Amino acid sequence: MAGSLLREKGGQPAKVGFIELFFDLVFVFAVTQISHTLLEHLTWMGALQGAIMLCALWWAWIDTSWITNWLDPEHPHVRLLLFALMAAGLVMSTSLPEAFGEKGLVFACAFAALQVGRGLFTLRAVRHDKSMHANFRRITVWAAAGGLLWIVGGVLQDGARLAVWLVAVALEFAGPACYFWVPGLGRSHTSEWEVQGEHLAERVGLFVIICLGESVLVMGATFAGLNWTAPVVGAFAAAFIGTLAMWWIYFARAHQAASDAIEQSDDSGRVARRAYTYAPILVVAGVIGTAVGDELSLSHPGGPIEFPAAMALIGGPMLFLIGALTFKLASFGVWSPSRLAGVAALAALIFAVPWLTPAGLAASATAVLVGVAAWESLARRPTPHKAAPKKKRPS
């Protein structure tokens, strides 16, 4: 590989490139596949399987976003890497509906190839940086161990596959938390994961936009095929306003303040790991769950509420607010009273389910989200917790 593949340090803040946006298109399709699969298998088992698939897609995406925070996506070799990862991601996405059926091994091999291939490429790209090279040696070992578990699960059937893949997902989450500790290689340190906060915040924000956009597509396509009766129009209005409220809550002032907190911290890797690696998965899950609930309320706005629909209509917004609450806690070290109150209000809606229609429950959940958004709009600007000037690396 001729020349450095790393972004230049000390210049302008890293910007999201067009190739990164192009890479995200694969995950637009993947999110659609997950929501449609959940609609077809709206059971506890279907929800668990959907959660496993979402976790796999999230780690494939967020790990790549960390890589492009360090590597220059405008370099031809990095572009080729992203094209290859897109191909693997597309195979993952197309096989997702049958991941617990006939295409489990295909899904697993695509995920393993994406994770391990990206690690090996980066290991080669950072070979002249002693600290980063040691870091990616550990990361690649963890990726290989995780990939092996996914492939083993893909060979197995039914409950055995589910059990092995649950362990594989746990391993993906444990890696950053354990600092990628490997016997004989030691552990990494978050101080070695120096990131540009503005870039990582924008990347995660774009993924949330992808999920919100999929929600808009679902509600629009469903609404277009229905008779526009008063209950259907009411359910559509609730779904649309709820989506706007989720956008408002996530992209409020706290989002930019969190980006600033990373930039100002003397351990940007630690803040980014908590705020932009772990917390957003709950936000994403909440948006997808809310989209499922919106389609159910649009298709059947009247009558009694079935249990799966109630869980989607309440659980989706609740997961979103829990994720938004966790994001704020991870970024600033403070609990958000507005988001805590929103979670409590959604939990209280469970007791009102017997007296509400699906459209009524959707409107009630939307009212909670709007209330949280309004509360935060009137609140004062959040202050980063214990922010300190970032220490510069010695040249």
Image: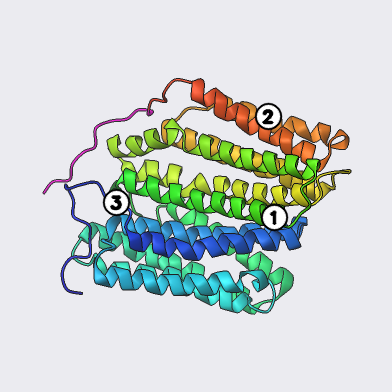
- Residue at image position (68%, 40%) is 237
* Residue of label 3: 15
Please state the horizontal and vertical placement of residue 247, each as a whole percent of the image: 53, 40
Q: Foreground mark, 2 or 1? A: 1
Magenta stretch encompasses residue 247: no
Marks 3 and 2, the one that precedes in the sequence: 3
* Left-right relation of 151 to 300: left
- The residue beneath circle 2 is 344
Residue type indicated by callout 2: Ala
- Residue 217 to residue 230: above or below: below
The quadrant of the picture occupied by the N terminus is: bottom left
Q: Which residues are magenta?
A: 384-395
Position of 214 compared to 229: left or right?
A: left
Residue 145, can we see it? yes
How far separated are the C-alphas under marks 3 and 1?
A: 37 Å
Q: Tell me the distance, in whole angstroms, between the alpha carbons under discs 2 and 1.
A: 34 Å
Q: Earlier in the sequence, mark 2 or mark 1?
A: 1
Q: Which residue is mark 1?
A: 224
- Residue 185 seen: no
Q: In the figure, is residue 43 to the left or right of 381?
A: right
The residue lying toward the viewer, choosing from 394 and 254, is 254
- Which amino acid type is shown beneath numbered disc 3? Lys
Q: Which numbered dot is residue 123? A: none
Residue depicted at 70% across the width and 35% down the height: 365
Quarter of image, res 62: bottom left
Residue 274 in the image: state x and y as whole percent.
44, 43
Q: In this rendering, which labeled residue sits more in front, label 3 or label 1?
A: 1
